[in-house]
Amino acid sequence: MITILAFLLLAALAAVCYFYRPTETLAEEPSRPEVKKLMSVATAAIKARKPLKAEKALIAILRLDEKNAAAYTRLGIIYAKSRRFKEARECFEIASSLEWNATSLYNVGLIYLETGHLDRARNALVSALELEGDQPKHYIALSRAEEKLGLFDSARDRLESAYALEPTLRTLKSILLVDEAIGDEDQIAATRSRISAIISRPKRTPRIPKPPKLPRKKI
């Protein structure tokens, strides 16, 4: 009787060992060298303006690594450039859920802005600005969303912040458009004066360095 019980216990233990193997052997991690190689292919294809090849490489990466935020971001950019906004938005939303960073939020905001989801665009761009407040493009994109929402005073403040970081004539002209929408004549005149000051500023000619003097050869 003891022998039979011992045999049954050994059989049960063997069954447990067979069915409860470690999950790592059943679901291996994607090959990192392979993902790196595919990302290099995608990067080269994007630079060569071959979006279809880049798209295939990025989709292949996501089949190996479904949590690769960089692949989703680059795929979203490809879709956005080809005006496939629905697919681009989905890619950027997934990327931002995987990695909460300013770049993903900025991209999501631009797509929302392009497709007319203005409140969502503003929320995403405000979040991007909170994470990374030293990028003029974040302020400019947010000003566009707020201008379309009729928040002209706030939109103007965003543009002034962008101009403080990077003083360009283009940003000043955007400020003037907001001033005209607000209808403040004094502010319009002041902004036009700022624009005129930049336009009338003499352009500096780059200094061409003199060639180095060569030693005289003795005859």
Image (tube, rainbow, N blue to C red):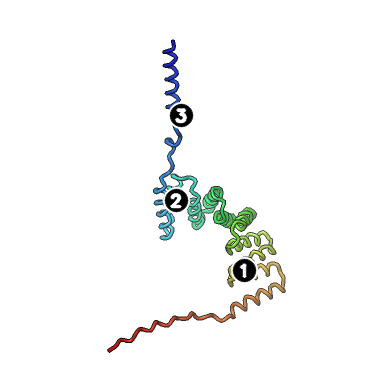
Residue 24 lies in quadrant: top left
Res. 214 image quadrant:
bottom left
Quarter of the image for residue 12 reads top left
- Label 1: element kind: helix
- Residue 116 visible: no
Category of crowding for the residue at label 2, using alpha-carbon neighbours closer than 10 angstroms: few (below 14), some (14–19), many (at least 20): many
Q: Label 1 crowding class (10 Å Cα cut-off): few <14, some 14-19, many 20+?
A: few
Say whether residue 185 is left or right of residue 55: right
Extreme residue toward the bottom, this view:
219
Tell me, for residue 126, which label it has, or none: none
Circle 3: is it few (<14), some (14-19), or many (20+) Cα within 10 Å? few
Residue closest to the eye, 78 or 99: 99
Q: Which residue is mark 1?
A: 164
- Disc nearer the start of the sequence (3/1): 3
Confirm or deny contact between disc 1 and disc 2 (CB under 8 A): no
Q: CA distance from mark 2 to mark 3?
A: 35 Å
Q: Which residue is mark 2?
A: 58
User: Taking the image as drawn, is residue 44 in sight?
Assistant: yes
Please give the residue where the numbered disc 3 appears in the rendered image.
20
